């Protein structure tokens, strides 16, 4: 965001005034040539160790991979 101000009309203004419209100006430049950062060998090793500690790729701590197949209501 570059500027936020109120105005009496739904349009840009040099100076905001007490009005019914809130104007939010944003910088909308997008670089389409940006590439995601490639993981380093250290990143890959950390991921491999994390996956090993959590039971394999895709499994995460806190999710059960087995256990009771039915739940009985408490009396």
Image (cartoon, helix red, strand yellow):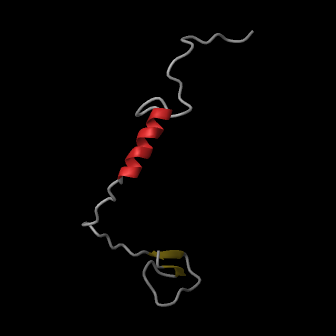
Query: Foreground: 60 or 21?
Result: 60
Query: Foreground: 64 or 51?
Result: 51
User: Residue 75: where, in percent of width, then height?
Assistant: 75, 9
Please give left or right for residue 3 compared with residue 71 in the image: left
Q: What residue is at 52 percent from the left and 82 percent from the top?
A: 7
User: Residue 28: where, in percent of width, then height?
Assistant: 36, 72
Count of marks placed on residues:
0
Q: Residue furthest left?
A: 33
> Is the residue 66 above or below the residue 47 in the image?
above
Q: What residue is at 28 percent from the left and 65 percent from the top?
A: 34
Q: What residue is at 50 percent from the left and 22 percent from the top?
A: 65
Query: Foreground: 52 or 12?
Result: 52
Q: Residue furthest bottom?
A: 14
User: Residue 24: where, in percent of width, then height?
Assistant: 47, 74
Query: Foreground: 43 or 18?
Result: 43
Q: What residue is at 40 percent from the left and 51 percent from the top?
A: 42
User: Residue 16: where, in percent of width, then height?
Assistant: 53, 86
> Is the residue 69 above or below the residue 9 in the image?
above
Q: Quadrant of residue 45?
A: top left
């Amino acid at each position: 965001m570059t500027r936020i101000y109120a105005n009496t009309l739904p349009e840009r203004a040099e100076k905001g005034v007490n009005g019914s419209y809130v104007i939010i100006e944003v910088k909308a430049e997008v670089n389409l040539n940006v590439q995601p950062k490639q993981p380093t060998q250290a990143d890959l090793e950390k991921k491999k160790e994390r996956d090993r500690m959590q039971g394999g790729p895709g499994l995460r701590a806190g999710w059960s991979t087995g256990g009771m197949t039915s739940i009985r209501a408490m009396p």
